[in-house]
């Protein structure tokens, strides 16, 4: 039995509309028709943005285009799953990138909206045919040609002359010009036998982006600190320090404030508008061949190339980066009988990217040899990091990494209908290859300073950098094999049972030249060379999936549905990103918190004895057709992740003891780290867990009387012990080196958790006038559309110790929690929409311990106020504030469109010259990004107030932008 509206790929397509109520499947899913795909006001015309219209879907803010370790695509969580757990499919081929994230150009989107025929999202409890995923499934099918020629040509224009100012812009709007143009055409090559479809789209963009930096004031650059203490809280006393001559050279990289001073006068704002230039080209093509009445063949190919240039954070150099993608699919379908169809599909997915590197010098000071970390490394890169200031970076003229990803795929699916049973069975094989050259942050010298005073005096608290050596590429390989059986059994006329099982395994991770290394334990004296990288945990990956769909009233208008399934998280190549550049031989890295330094090799550790990483999903929902063309679905969705990947950027630390006041680190600065044989150790374990509970509501009014509306509301909560699936900060709010020795201290809402999300979209064809002539032309053909999105903010973690190591962890990535106060005014620790102080710093204090253990505590030399009676400040005691306890700014965004359709029947029946006006962020609301990076530090490492605490410096949406377009279709 073939479901109405679905298709057996390339063989049988039923074009009737999908039933209003799903009576045969327990899968929670939503489908977007081709007209909606092409006519909604999508900012950037990216078809993957349609995912956000569905219940259960949230998109988390990321660091942006400089953090390519996590991929360029949007970080989408579906029903509480990690963004790396989704499977994106185009024409049945998996198109995930090297980080197992969503595909995307350097702008984060996917062009080709006009080439998409069908789009759907499966958010929970999908059938056994879908593998390689424990999150959601995003499906897109490309358009085919027909016996008639159809096509389109268009150009979309934007420029700063019509835009509103961004909240952080200066007196004028930064220059902006965007041209997005292209065309599509499809038709017959041989009527009834061979058809083609082709689409081309291009973006030419020069976007002015205002960047906000915190820099030293003129007085501070001269060594005069705290020059305006009056009214400063906490109070500070004017201090003069001698500026070290070495520091003076680095000050040439930091501009003077141009947008006012902050608090005590030591720092101010430097704002500038840098031009982000993108020239992207996308092309896709498809050919369909009807070989016979029983055999059909189609092939598709897509290509996208997107180079980007933009200035670095302090406008010292122009950097360049690039992303390139290629996707191909070939499928043959054969009808053996009316009840037996088989499809064989081949696929190829390639993604290559080069990280940002300097290509043009704007400030000659960056070439000063005195600033170089080590010229023999091939780049003068060096980074200075400290609390209260934007980092000073001597840029690299070599990319930090280059990734080349290939995925070769083959699938075979058979569909058999026999009585009340609709059987589908088959299997798939995928060979993944990642060729990577990694120059991580360790290839620059990183100096960390506990305070501005320490920086000016050249007293770093920690120095880390590479001892010059070669860079050895890695050629990583793994394969995936899966088989499945799915039976949709119509047990009764009003009851369908969905019964399935899938088996899926990987071959383990190998390297073609035997250059794999792994520390078997943190304390190991030497690494283990060669494969296997770890014990294969996937050999027994059987995944049962069961569900039901019940029509209690036998009317076809109500369905009660539920299901349970197991979904494995496979140990794929993305788990080795940036680890794969560190072995055989190790890079020699010096890392110490107590100068002078000594040399230690740095490495990575994957748990050798992996546990099976899997997610259990369950749901119960009711769907009802309230009136014709209007359906409502209300459901509960839950999941639990077991043995999830837990990543730490540096696990080689001094271990604490558990005292009555909490975890306490040794007082002595000479205490050894966990392993004296190595420096920093990037640690990957499979010991994490996660929990998700959510209410999901969907409302859909199908097109009738010229109006269609879709709404979704999600109220959910995802809790885990760690959200990091890739090296570095997965998201802008991630903490990369949590207390791995006690996961109970790391539990909190997930980094990507957004509690409440409301999305409404729709279009309205304004009723036509009966007037003729010019008046009729003016009055007729108008169409309104829009997308409204309202959601809570992302969480973030209050920290202390930027630029230092107050606990004495001796980590390359140290951090500590402050203590949280619960007194008056601190029920919520935020000042909503307060740009200069979003976090209520008065609701936090430095960690304190009972006076009885004062001898085991180190103090904070710059603490502004005395510790409460009976307690002492204890810098080596972990604070109690906890992970992700602050919720960042929410979002309200309305994108609208107004179309004027002009059908010219003299040319052809379907010829339409459509004029478009699209307004993005119509309300011009400043949707602030979370205070991340240095702005989540409440205190400096020495205990002083961090002047950047709670500072909001950017937005996640643009200001109001107006776009005009002309689109011709025929």
Image (cartoon, rainbow, N blue to C red):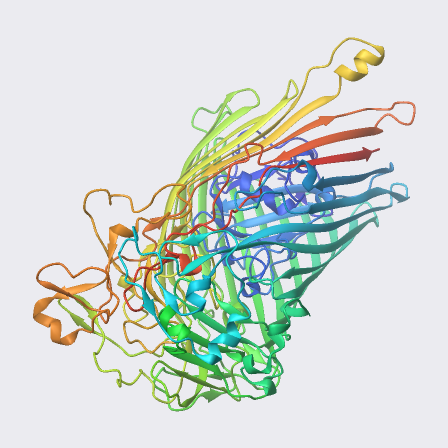
Dividing the image into 4 quarters, which one contains the C terminus?
top right
Along the viewing direction, whichever of 930 and 583 lies nearer the viewer: 930
Q: What residue do we see at 78% from left, 40% from top?
A: 155
Q: What residue do we see at 41% from left, 36% from top?
A: 635
- Furthest residue toward top: 771
In the image, 266: left or right of 181? Answer: left
Can residue 686 be seen here? The reply is no
Q: What residue do we see at 45% from left, 78% from top?
A: 534
Dividing the image into 4 quarters, which one contains the N terminus?
top right
Q: Where 408 sits versus 935, above or below? A: below
Q: Position of residue 555 (x, y in %)?
A: 49, 23
Q: Where 744 sits versus 369, above or below? A: above
In the image, 840: left or right of 792? Answer: left
Q: Position of residue 788 (x, y in %)?
A: 54, 33
Q: How many marks?
A: 0
Q: Position of residue 616 (x, y in %)?
A: 40, 54
* Residue 722 location, quadrant: bottom left
Q: Where 14 sits versus 391, above or below? A: above
Along the viewing direction, whichever of 335 and 685 lies nearer the viewer: 685
Q: Position of residue 193 (x, y in %)?
A: 87, 45
Can residue 663 be seen here? The reply is yes
């Amino acid at each position: 039995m073939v479901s109405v509206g679905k298709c057996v790929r390339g063989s049988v397509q039923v074009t009737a509309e999908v039933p209003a109520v799903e009576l045969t499947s327990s899968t929670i899913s939503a489908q977007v028709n081709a007209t909606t795909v092409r006519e909604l006001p999508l900012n950037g015309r990216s078809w993957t943005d349609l995912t956000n219209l569905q219940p259960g879907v949230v998109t988390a803010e990321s660091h942006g285009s400089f953090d390519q370790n996590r991929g360029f695509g949007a970080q989408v969580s579906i029903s509480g799953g990690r963004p790396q757990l989704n499977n994106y499919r185009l024409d049945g081929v998996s198109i995930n990138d090297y980080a197992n994230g969503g595909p995307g150009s350097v702008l984060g989107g996917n062009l080709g909206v006009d080439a998409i025929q069908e789009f759907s999202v499966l958010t929970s409890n999908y059938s056994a045919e879908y593998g390689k995923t424990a999150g959601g499934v995003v499906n897109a099918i490309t358009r085919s040609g027909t016996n008639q020629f159809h096509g389109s040509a268009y150009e979309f224009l934007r420029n700063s002359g019509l835009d509103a100012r961004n909240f952080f812009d200066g007196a004028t709007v930064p220059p902006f010009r965007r041209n997005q143009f292209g065309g599509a055409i499809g038709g017959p090559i041989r009527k009834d036998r061979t058809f083609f479809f082709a689409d081309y789209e291009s973006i030419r963009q020069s976007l002015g982006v205002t960047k906000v930096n915190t820099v030293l004031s003129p007085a501070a650059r001269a060594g005069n600190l705290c020059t305006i203490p009056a009214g400063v809280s906490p109070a500070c006393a004017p201090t003069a320090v001698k500026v070290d001559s070495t520091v003076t050279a680095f000050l040439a990289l930091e501009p003077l404030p141009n947008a006012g001073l902050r608090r005590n006068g030591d720092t101010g704002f430097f704002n500038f508008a840098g031009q982000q230039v993108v020239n992207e080209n996308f092309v896709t093509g498809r050919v369909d061949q009807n070989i016979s009445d029983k055999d059909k063949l189609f092939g598709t190919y897509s290509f996208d190339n997107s180079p980007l240039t933009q200035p670095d954070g302090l406008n010292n150099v122009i950097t360049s980066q690039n992303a390139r993608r290629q996707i191909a699919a070939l499928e043959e379908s054969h009808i053996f009988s009316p009840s037996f169809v088989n499809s064989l599909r081949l696929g190829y997915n390639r993604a290559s990217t080069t990280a940002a590197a300097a290509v043009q010098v704007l400030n000659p000071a960056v070439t000063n040899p005195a600033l170089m970390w080590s010229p023999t490394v091939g780049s003068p890169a060096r980074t200075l990091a400290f609390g209260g200031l934007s980092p000073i970076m001597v840029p690299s003229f070599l990319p930090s990494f280059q990734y080349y990803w290939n995925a070769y795929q083959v699938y075979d699916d058979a569909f058999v209908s026999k009585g009340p049973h609709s059987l589908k069975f088959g299997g798939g094989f995928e060979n993944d290859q990642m060729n990577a050259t990694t120059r991580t942050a360790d290839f620059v010298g990183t100096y960390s300073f506990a305070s501005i005073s320490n920086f000016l005096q050249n007293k770093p608290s920690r120095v880390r950098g590479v001892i010059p050596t070669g860079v050895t590429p890695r050629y990583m390989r793994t394969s995936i094999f899966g088989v499945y059986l799915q039976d949709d059994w119509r047990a009764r006329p009003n009851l369908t049972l969905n019964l399935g099982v899938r088996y899926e395994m990987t071959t383990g991770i190998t390297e073609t030249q035997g250059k794999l290394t792994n520390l078997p334990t943190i304390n190991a004296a030497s690494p283990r060379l060669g494969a296997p990288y770890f014990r294969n945990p996937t050999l027994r990956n059987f995944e049962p999936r069961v569900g039901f769909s019940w029509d209690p009233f036998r009317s076809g208008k109500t369905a009660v549905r539920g299901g349970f399934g197991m979904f494995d998280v496979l140990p794929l190549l993305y788990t080795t990103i940036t680890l794969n550049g560190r072995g055989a031989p190790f890079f020699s890295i010096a890392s110490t918190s107590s100068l002078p330094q000594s040399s230690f090799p740095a490495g990575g550790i994957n748990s050798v004895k992996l546990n099976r990483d899997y997610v259990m999903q369950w749901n119960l929902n009711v769907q009802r057709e309230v009136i014709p063309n209007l359906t409502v679905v209300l459901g509960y969705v839950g999941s639990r992740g077991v043995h999830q990947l837990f990543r730490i950027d540096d696990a080689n630390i001094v271990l604490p003891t558990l005292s009555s006041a909490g975890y306490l680190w040794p007082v002595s600065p000479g205490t050894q780290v966990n392993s004296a044989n190595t420096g920093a150790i990037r640690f990957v374990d499979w010991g994490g867990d996660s929990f998700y509970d959510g209410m999901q509501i969907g409302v859909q009014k199908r097109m009738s009387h010229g109006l269609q509306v879709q709404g979704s509301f999600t109220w959910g909560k995802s809790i885990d012990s760690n959200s990091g699936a890739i090296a570095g900060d997965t998201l802008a709010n991630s903490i990369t080196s949590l207390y791995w020795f006690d996961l109970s201290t790391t539990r909190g809402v997930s980094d990507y958790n957004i509690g409440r999300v409301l999305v409404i979209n729709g279009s309205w064809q304004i009723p036509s006038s009966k007037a003729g002539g010019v008046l009729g032309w003016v009055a007729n053909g108008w169409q309104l559309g829009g997308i409204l999105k309202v959601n809570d903010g992302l969480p973030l973690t209050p920290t202390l110790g930027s630029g230092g190591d107050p606990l004495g962890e001796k980590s390359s990535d140290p951090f500590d929690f402050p203590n949280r106060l619960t007194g008056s005014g601190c029920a919520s620790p935020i000042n909503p929409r307060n740009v200069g102080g979003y976090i209520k710093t008065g609701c936090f204090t430095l960690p304190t311990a009972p006076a009885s253990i004062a001898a085991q505590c180190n103090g904070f030399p710059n603490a502004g106020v005395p510790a409460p009676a009976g307690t002492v400040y204890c810098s080596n005691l972990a604070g109690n504030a906890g992970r992700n306890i602050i919720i960042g700014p929410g979002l309200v965004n309305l994108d609208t469109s107004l179309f004027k359709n002009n059908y010219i029947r003299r040319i052809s029946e379907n010829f339409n010259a459509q004029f478009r006006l699209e307004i993005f962020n119509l309300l011009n609301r400043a949707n602030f990004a979370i205070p991340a990076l240095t702005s989540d530090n409440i205190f400096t490492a020495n205990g002083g107030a961090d002047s950047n605490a709670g500072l909001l410096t950017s937005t996640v949406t643009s200001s109001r932008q107006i776009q005009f377009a002309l689109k011709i279709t025929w």
